[in-house]
Amino acid sequence: MNATLDPVGTKLEREFKHARPLIGCRFDPAGRFLFASAEDNSIQRFDLLTGSRTSLTGHTSWVRGMTFLMADAAAAAVRAAASHPQADRAVLGFAAKPAPKPHPFTLISGDYSGKLIWWDGAADAPKPIRTVHAHAGWVRAVAASPDGTILASCGNDNSVKLWTADGKPLRTFEGHASHVYNVAFHPDGTRLASQELMGIVKEWDTKTGACRRDIDCKDLHKYDPTFMAHHGGARAMTFNKDGSKLAVAGITNVSNAFAGVGNPVVMLFDWKSGQAKQLKPKEGFQGTMWGMAFHPSGYAIAAAGGSAGRLWFWKKDELVSSHTVNAPASARDMALDPLGRRVALAGSNGSAIVYALKTTA
């Protein structure tokens, strides 16, 4: 979609409530459902078409990482539906009743006890269909390759692992010196980026397992001698569409590791050179940048949480945000829907907050 985005037109569309604070959020590949993980170890599925909610239970600890797989036929149907002039009206809830059945897809989620769980994400009542003990300690992130054939996970055992789509181990990447916070596939599918607590980004060859290079991202790390603790790590990591940029989001200028006092930032890397620029909010804010995405229009969008919640927009090639949205809760994750028409926040107050973005084709 070649869309023009008007950030000033961003409007609060819907707020789903849950009894416990939320940790992560992701839209499914069709943009019909918003999945939000919570501190009661559940994943809540919110249907944007009907407003209904379904609870996915099976994890025994908090879930942060979530990704999706969709069969080629279903993906083709989603692309066709997205091109229909009434596609957005349908998601907004104006579709004929009863609501159409969702396109099938698989959700893979990772928890703090080291497990990955596979779910039939479109089922009326999703149940775990496969569980893999993936890491010793937290699974901090999970990602799917562009062609949907490989999964990557990372965690507190300092490793990055590759899996087949049905959960069979393929390869383990070792070389990080500390907890690995995030992973992202390059759009060409042959390379993978991962980032650790100590601020190093590694580029891996997915075919050979070789580490091609280390990239300095130490602005997202600080050792606090008072509390004798390291603080940092990539809370979000993503490539732009053509793979020329890598965005790594987190916290910088940490002055108190125990309380997480610092400033939210996005480190924007030129992927070829490895050189970085900082994307900063135009106003002062204390907290952590928990989510980041590239909009098809060229804007960068990121969300932070601290004493409050914020959503910021950066125009292409600008380093200071051009627009701010004050969120009703501290944001602990952010997701952009596949059509680029919505952004969601996982709120510390238990709210899944959905904003409608003003776009023109």
Image (cartoon, grey):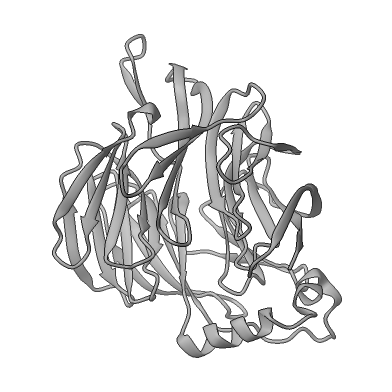
Q: Is residue 81 left or right of 169 when viewed as pictured?
A: right
Q: Position of residue 326 (x, y in %)?
A: 75, 36
Q: Position of residue 300 (x, y in %)?
A: 58, 47
Query: What residue occupies the far top of the structure in this picture?
Result: 226
- Residue at figure coordinates x 82%, y 72% from the top left: 93
Image quadrant occupied by the C terminus: bottom right
Image quadrant occupied by the N terminus: bottom right
- Number of residue marks: 0
Q: Quadrant of residue 177?
A: top left
The front one of 205 and 309 is 205
Q: Quadrant of residue 103?
A: bottom right
The front one of 265 and 157 is 265
Q: Position of residue 198 (x, y in %)?
A: 28, 31
Q: Is residue 344 left or right of 38 when viewed as pictured?
A: right
- Residue at figure coordinates x 48%, y 61% from the top left: 241
Residue 2 visible in the shown view: yes
Query: What residue occupies the far bottom of the structure in this picture?
Result: 73
Q: Is residue 75 left or right of 198 when viewed as pictured?
A: right
Q: Position of residue 270 (x, y in %)?
A: 38, 45
Q: Is residue 164 left or right of 210 when viewed as pictured?
A: right
The front one of 358 and 346 is 358
Q: Is residue 15 above or below residue 151?
A: above
